[in-house]
Amino acid sequence: MMDRRALLAALGLLAASRYAEAQKAGKVYRIGVLSSAGPEQERALQAALRERLRERGWVEGQNVVVEWRYAEGQYEKAPQLIAGLVGLKPDLLMTRGGPVTTAAKRATATLPIVMWSVTDPVGIGVVASLAQPGGNVTGLADDGDPEITGKRLQLLKQVARATTKVAIITRVASAGVVPRVTSYLRATETAAKALGLTVQSWEVQGADDIDRAFNAILGAGFGALFVPYQPVTWMHRRRIIDLAARHRLPAIYTLGSYALDGGLMAYGEDEREVPQRLAVYVDKILKGAKPVDLPIEQPSKFELVINLKTAKALGLTIPPSLLQRADQVIE
């Protein structure tokens, strides 16, 4: 009787053989991608992912075709957009964001799905566990320990030492991620209390809500901002950054791209690592691996980005120890 190790080796050889046969036959693989964001946000990721796949032998237009679609923060469009991609008969789906991944999971139980930027994939029901996903979904979760929010408040407090009240700008959470959002808020409140801070959330759905939120924040006497990544806060990031500058509100964001566009500082997952990690999943699945056998990855590298130009405009002094710790300093 063949032992387990020998069986796995044989299956691996079989998968590799089938892949080689397909390549010889000139098969062109098709990947359907649905992002919860828009084309502008995905431009850098697209270019990097294309290059990472090329390094593994997947050349777009030769042996792989990638079809991109965008929900642009309008999650109600996700089921229709996913249905359109499934109709193209792809070999693989890729999905950014929890609501979009949930829509894909509901649309197909057979097509492999590689997700990224998904908050609590277990809690929203798209995988059974991080170690053993089960079913047809694998990929990247965007959240590590909820205590990361406490670290962001600590960083903000080091820069804005006079701050006692921090406003959180976020969007209305979809039903599936409410438990995870609640855990983050609790972690934030606990960390805030230890730092002598008061925190309160303002939920926004679009551009008009942002102006109203700022009026309310200022009226309530809040002196600093914490802006988590959401499609709505990213698409309107320049408006948020401009209002924060106009009203001299120090702010910390969760992605470095906000700081690169003028935000004071950001601490979160290194976005530059995402395309490389996604390419590994795509490569393995197109070569025969099953999502059920590929554990979910959580962020392993976080980066601190400080915009020194913005700090000077706000009249803030960044402690030398913080500048030394930063992965990027924008001058």
Image (tube, rainbow, N blue to C red):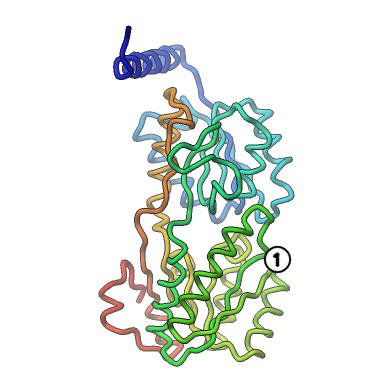
Residue situated furthest front in the rendering: 1
Q: Residue 69: horizontal and vertical position, in percent?
A: 63, 43
Residue 93 vs 208, above or below: the answer is above
Q: Residue 285: horizontal and vertical position, in percent?
A: 45, 29
Classed neighbour count for the residue bearing mark 1: other residues with Cα under 10 Å, few (<14), some (14–19), many (≥20):
some
Question: Quadrant of residue 103 in the image?
Answer: top right
> What residue do we see at 30% from left, 78% from top?
322
- Foreground of the two, 262 or 173: 173
Label tally:
1
| Residue type, label 1 | Gln
Residue 281 vs 306, above or below: the answer is above
Residue 71 vs 196, above or below: the answer is above
Q: Residue 271: horizontal and vertical position, in percent?
A: 42, 56
User: Disc 1 on helix, strand or loop?
Assistant: loop
Image quarter in which the N terminus is found: top left
> What residue do we see at 35% from left, 76% from top?
331
Q: Is residue 248 left or right of residue 319?
A: right
Residue 176 vs 281, above or below: the answer is below
> What residue do we see at 49% from left, 78% from top?
251
Identify the residue position indicated by label 1 in the image: 205
- Foreground of the two, 265 or 201: 201
Q: Is residue 196 left or right of residue 217?
A: left
Q: Is residue 211 left or right of residue 26?
A: right
> What residue do we see at 53% from left, 79% from top?
225
